[in-house]
Image (spheres, grey):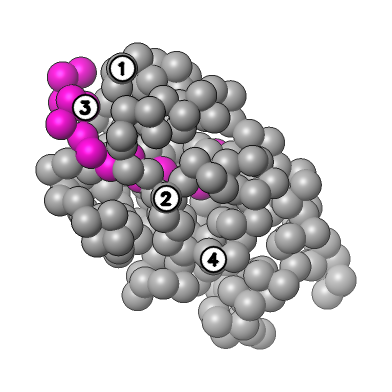
């Protein structure tokens, strides 16, 4: 646990970490597909939850390019942001990080406009320093590009940064970027079940 003492920057995944946006995405994609005469079961959605836009395009929208899918998401998502829920303990953690002088960022497979919509809906906009969305980099997670871009914007080295995520995509991206991976409700270099645990490690 001493490994957090030298951490200057905490980079977070968005979905399932900062906010629970499961119902935002599930409702949006289900309704988009229904408009096209297709159905989406919960089990089908669960099997692909957390993947990147390239996989979404191949699975759901083969008639569109990846760029068109991202634009479609950006236009439609704000109407679904109301379904988001703040992850318990996250606001307190972000306040504690701010008091401790730590840098913060979001690095997500979502487009930046969607990140900002969710942060605003959850009341977290003022507590996150940098937002890096998928359109800002060459490859989505599990590639390390998002985390590397966040570190560059925060001006921090990999040895002084960590990534907090809840999926295998997050773990792979963190390790490829050379940063400590904090697994939220999953294994990691450090594993936590509640954000109060992480707050204790920085105070």
Residue pointed to by mark 4: 111
Estimate how packed mark 4 is, as few (under 14), some (14 to 19) or many (20 or more) residues with alpha carbons within 10 Å.
many
Q: CA distance from mark 3 to mark 1?
A: 10 Å
Label 3 belongs to which residue?
Answer: 4
Q: Earlier in the sequence, mark 3 or mark 1?
A: 3
Identify the element where label 3 is drawn: helix
Which disc, if any, is residue 129?
2
Q: CA distance from mark 4 to mark 1?
A: 32 Å
Q: CA distance from mark 3 to mark 4?
A: 29 Å
Name the one closer to the observer, 95 or 138. 95
* Residue nearest the viewer, comparing 76 with 49: 76
**Which residue in the structure is indicated by mark 1?**
203
Q: Could you say whether the residue bearing mark 2 is in a helix, strand or loop?
A: loop
Q: Which residues are magenta?
A: 1-16
Whether pointer 4 and pointer 1 mark residues with C-beta atoms closer than 8 Å, the reply is no
Q: Secondary structure at mark 4?
A: loop
Query: x and y percent of residue 137 in the render?
Result: 37, 72
Q: Position of residue 48 (x, y in %)?
A: 56, 53
Instruction: Residue 125: give its label.
Output: none
On the rendered structure, is 84 left or right of 17?
right
Sequence-first tag of 3 and 2: 3
């Amino acid at each position: 646990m001493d490994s957090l003492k030298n951490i200057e920057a905490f980079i977070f995944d968005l979905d399932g970490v900062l906010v629970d946006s499961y119902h935002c995405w599930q409702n949006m994609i289900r309704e988009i597909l229904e408009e096209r005469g297709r159905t989406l079961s919960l089990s089908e959605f669960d099997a692909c939850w957390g993947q990147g836009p390239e996989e979404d395009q191949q699975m759901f929208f083969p008639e569109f390019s990846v760029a068109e899918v991202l634009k479609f998401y950006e236009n439609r998502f704000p109407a679904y942001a109301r379904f988001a829920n703040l992850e318990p303990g996250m606001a307190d953690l972000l306040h504690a990080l701010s008091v401790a002088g730590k840098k913060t960022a979001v690095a997500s497979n979502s487009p930046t406009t969607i990140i900002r919509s969710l942060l605003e809906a959850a009341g977290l906009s003022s507590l996150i320093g940098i937002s890096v969305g998928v359109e800002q980099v060459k490859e989505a997670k599990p590639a390390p590009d998002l985390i590397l871009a966040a570190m560059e914007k925060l001006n921090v080295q990999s040895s002084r940064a960590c990534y907090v995520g809840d999926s295998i995509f997050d773990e792979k991206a963190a390790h490829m970027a050379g940063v400590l991976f904090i697994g939220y409700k999953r294994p990691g270099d450090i594993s936590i079940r509640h954000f109060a645990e992480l707050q204790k490690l920085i105070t």
